[in-house]
């Protein structure tokens, strides 16, 4: 597997409702520690100077502003649930800066969902000023973008087949509840693994902490980060203390370099 110079930012580390949850008064939702506030899950990935964002949920605009991301070459989409897609209209400033459509990598079912849910973009006579999207339908085969090899990682979100992504020594998986042996093979020798862990109690469609730790134990990355967390993950400082040395609870704004 190739080695790249990788700089990553956790743009959002929260589950679909975000944290705090509207109307909730638990200790996490009322915490003043910024690491306990979680926007919808997304990740910024700079690979050898090529800039990707993985998923454009409802908080995409806010995430771009918070981290002053002004250069974006392509989007990698994991699946079509709204917390991963609803912010896609906000690629417009990037379109206007470059006067170019945004390349969007997604598998066929997800591409169809984008064409359906953002139908005004694809109408025969689009309103001037709609986002410009250049959808690339991908399969489980690795593909190349601007010299960067990207390996989609097939995982299951309950029964829904979705994608994680591996780029060189880095892999990112969110919203998984099972990972096949074939995909585990594609994760061999990953140095940094991001994987979802919703909470401590088991959940039907997302890994809980124990399941995520089990996967990490098998893959043995140098460092692992838990993301897509609900308020039930507990307070950042307390939960972090109980994790193995090479496993970290991610938080919004956390950066990684490798
Ligand atoms: Zn999600
Ligand atoms: Zn709460």
Image: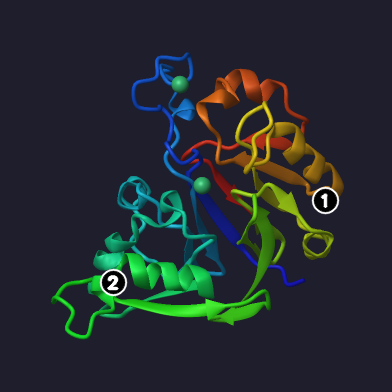
Instruction: Work out whether 66 lies above or below 180.
Output: above
Q: Quadrant of residue 86?
A: bottom left
Up the image or down, 78 lies above or below 139; here it is above
Residue 107 in sight: no
Residue 139 screen position, x and y as percent: 62, 77
Could you tell me which secondary element the residue under label 1 belongs to?
helix
Find disc 1 in the rendering and name its residue.
219
Kindly indicate whether the residue at mark 1 contacts the one at mark 2 (C-beta within 8 angstroms).
Answer: no
Q: Which scheme is used to colour this image of the protein?
A: rainbow
Q: CA distance from mark 2 to mark 1?
A: 40 Å
Task: Residue at 58% x, 41% y: name it.
Answer: 227
Sequence-wise, the earlier of marks 2 and 1 is: 2
Say if residue 41 shows up in the picture. yes
Q: Is residue 241 left or right of residue 108?
A: right
Q: Residue at x 52, y 36 (%)?
A: 251
Query: In the figure, is residue 193 to the left or right of 56?
Result: right
In the rendered image of this protein, does residue 237 appear above or below residue 195? above
Whether residue 4 sits left or right of residue 24 in the image: it is right
Where residue 128 appears, as percent x and y from the top left, is: 13, 77
**Closer to us: 161 or 234:** 161
Point out which mark residue 119 bears: 2
């Amino acid at each position: 597997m190739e080695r790249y110079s990788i700089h990553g930012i956790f743009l959002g580390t929260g589950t679909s409702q975000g944290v705090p949850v509207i109307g909730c008064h638990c200790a996490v939702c009322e915490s003043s520690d910024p690491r306990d506030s979680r926007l919808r899950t997304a990740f910024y990935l700079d690979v050898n100077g090529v800039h990707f964002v993985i998923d454009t949920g409802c908080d995409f605009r806010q995430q771009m502003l918070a981290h002053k991301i002004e250069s974006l070459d392509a989007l990698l989409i994991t699946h079509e649930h709204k917390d991963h897609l609803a912010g896609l209209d906000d690629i417009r400033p990037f379109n206007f800066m470059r006067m170019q459509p945004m390349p969007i990598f997604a598998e066929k079912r997800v591409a169809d969902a984008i064409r359906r849910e953002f139908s005004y973009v694809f109408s025969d006579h689009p309103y001037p000023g709609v986002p410009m999207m250049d959808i690339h339908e991908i399969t489980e085969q690795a593909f190349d973008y601007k010299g960067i090899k990207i390996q989609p990682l097939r995982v299951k979100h309950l029964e829904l087949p979705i994608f994680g992504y591996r780029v060189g020594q880095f892999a990112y998986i969110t919203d998984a509840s099972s990972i096949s042996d074939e995909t585990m093979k594609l994760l061999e020798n990953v140095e940094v693994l991001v994987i979802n862990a919703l909470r401590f109690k088991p959940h039907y469609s997302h890994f809980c902490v124990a399941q995520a730790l089990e996967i990490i134990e098998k893959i043995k990355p140098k460092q692992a980060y838990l993301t897509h967390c609900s308020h039930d993950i507990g307070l950042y400082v307390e939960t972090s203390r109980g994790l193995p040395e090479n496993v970290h609870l991610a938080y919004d704004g956390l950066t990684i370099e490798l």
